[in-house]
Image: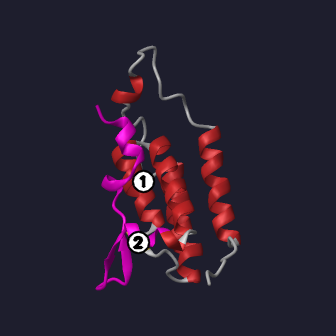
């Protein structure tokens, strides 16, 4: 019998934040028809003063630290977003993170991930994410 876990208020808040970033994101495409293949990050989380970095860091320190570790993946969802943003930009990182959060709610999908007994978590690196298949040449 499968247990159904309702979405927590914090998960809903994170979804709202991610959607708001998508609504205010700049258009990543130029006049080039193959712009999706050469999509380069316009901003990254390497700038410690960026709004995105501040929001993710605030979430990690204020919300996630009080709730305890709930993410069953390594790296955690917020670290996954940070790493993906540094490498692929905010738009693709947001899509990748939202997709990952939906998979997290489905416990049957855990069979597709490698279990790390030393961490007690499932390994899901950004390199193995399906969205990246569409961006490669």
**Residue at screen point 70% across, 74% down:** 6
The answer to whether 126 appears left or right of 107 in the picture is left
**Residue at screen point 30% across, 85% down:** 117
Q: Residue 31 at what x, y percent from top left?
A: 45, 14
Residue 15: name its quadrant: bottom right
Q: Which residue is mark 1?
A: 48
Nearer-the-camera pick, 6 or 88 = 6
Q: What are the residue bounds of the magenta stretch? A: 109-137
Residue 136: name its quadrant: top left
Which structural element holds mark 1?
loop
Q: Residue 88 at what x, y percent from top left?
A: 37, 43
Tell me, for residue 102, which label it has, or none: none
Q: Which residue is mark 2?
A: 111
**Residue at screen point 45% across, 48% down:** 93
Nearer-the-camera pick, 43 or 136 = 136
**Residue at screen point 37% across, 56% down:** 83
């Amino acid at each position: 019998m499968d247990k159904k876990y309702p979405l927590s208020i914090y998960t809903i808040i994170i979804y709202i934040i991610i959607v708001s970033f998508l609504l205010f994101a700049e258009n990543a495409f130029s006049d080039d028809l193959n712009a999706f293949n050469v999509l380069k990050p316009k901003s990254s989380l390497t700038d410690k003063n960026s709004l995105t970095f501040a929001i993710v860091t605030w979430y990690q320190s204020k919300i996630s630290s009080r709730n305890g570790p709930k993410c069953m993946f390594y790296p955690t969802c917020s670290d996954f977003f940070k790493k993906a943003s540094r490498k692929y930009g905010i738009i693709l990182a947001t899509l990748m993170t939202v997709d990952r959060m939906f998979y997290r709610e489905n416990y049957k999908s855990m069979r597709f991930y490698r279990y790390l007994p030393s961490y007690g978590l499932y390994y899901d690196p950004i390199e193995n994410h399906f969205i990246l298949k569409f961006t490669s040449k």
